[in-house]
Image (cartoon, rainbow, N blue to C red):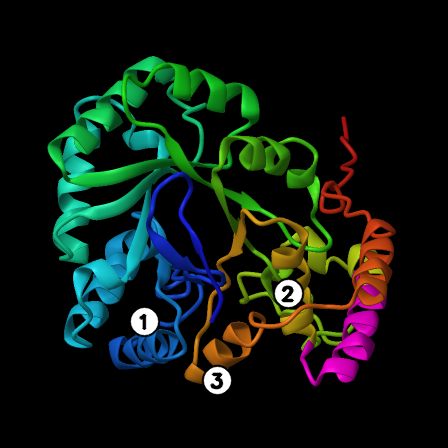
Amino acid sequence: MEHTTLGKTKEKISRIGLGAWQFSEAWGLTDYEKAKAVVSRALELGINFFDTAMVYGNGLSEAMLGKALKELGVKRDEVVVTTKIPADFLNPLDIPRAVEKSLKLLGLGYIDALLVHWPPAWHNYPTRVYARALEKLVNSGAVRYLGLSNFPVELVESFRSSLSRADVEVFQHRYNLVERWAEEEVIPYAESCQITVQAWSPIAKGALTGKYTPENLPRFADVRAADPVFHPSNFAKVYELVKLLKAVGEKYGKTPTQVALNWLIASSPVVVPIPGAKSPEQVEEIAGAAGWRLRLEDWRLIDEASRAVSISYSVYYVEREVKV
């Protein structure tokens, strides 16, 4: 496994992390022993960077991840765990209460990095207020580092300027071969400021794995079914890229998933994909995305094919006739 460092810290993290949203009802992995097997295989393969969130299973993901790490006998300083606080909790009353609960669920003593999950647009909590409240948790030792998830650069600047001694060490943004908006501002900013970018949905919720075809798309009960990437009008374009990923992968003995993840980590030194996995076999596949590099000609072919894919997010917007 390749490694890098978390932001400007000296924390050693694997170049491929493991997201834990799947340990929830949303993705169906609620069996603790199966979740533990996933975490165990990740550790065996050198993955030491784990991400979860308070809203994943309403605490179930944090509880299962923390319990698995403890039962597997992992030393605390051998893993780096990030979790996220939802925007609704970003007031001075709820922040310490929510983090206290998160600490109990994880059971790891402290949180390595606490990220704000989304900007608080619903309640309009002032950035300065929640930034300073979060920094108090760093001062107390409950949290080691701070991060922001799904924040535009303008709000990042406001957040950072509100801190007195801590800084932002990690971002989390949607970033994959068919959704590349993070390249416009977020990733260049992160590179200039030495901020790690956790790429969520790095294989577009499975759209880039080769599992799906235009004739075989996720069904209604699947959490992916309503994702615009899987809408037939979008997926027809995505599938052309998937066919290229398969062809390139055959040259290297790699799967489309491994090629798609490798392309991301080859594209920027700050990007660390955090795909999910629901079985030890899937962990083996994502871990196999590191430790090698695409040749330039193959990287370029994928880059050009990727740029030809544009995802329309208004595809599910339905026109309705009003009868009077």
- Please name the residue shown 26% across and 47% down the image: 112
Q: Is residue 297 located in the magenta-colored stretch of the structure?
A: no
Q: Which mark is residue 30?
A: 1
How many badges with numbers are in the image? Answer: 3
Element under label 1?
Answer: loop
Span colored in magenta: 238-255
Q: Residues within 10 Å of mark 3 (few under 14, many from 20)?
A: few
* Circle 3 residue: 281
- Please name the residue shown 15% across and 75% down the image: 71
Q: Is residue 51 visible?
A: no
Q: CA distance from mark 1 to mark 3?
A: 18 Å
Q: Residues within 10 Å of mark 2 (few under 14, many from 20)?
A: many
Which of disc 2 and disc 1 is earlier in sequence? Answer: 1
Residue 247 rendering spot, x and y as whole percentages: 82, 78
Q: CA distance from mark 2 to mark 3?
A: 18 Å
Contact, CB < 8 Å: mark 2 with mark 3? no
Q: Which mark is residue 8?
A: none
Which of disc 3 and disc 1 is earlier in sequence? Answer: 1
Residue 234 rendering spot, x and y as whole percentages: 79, 55
Q: Amino acid at mark 3?
A: Glu
Q: Amino acid at mark 1?
A: Thr
* Circle 2 residue: 262
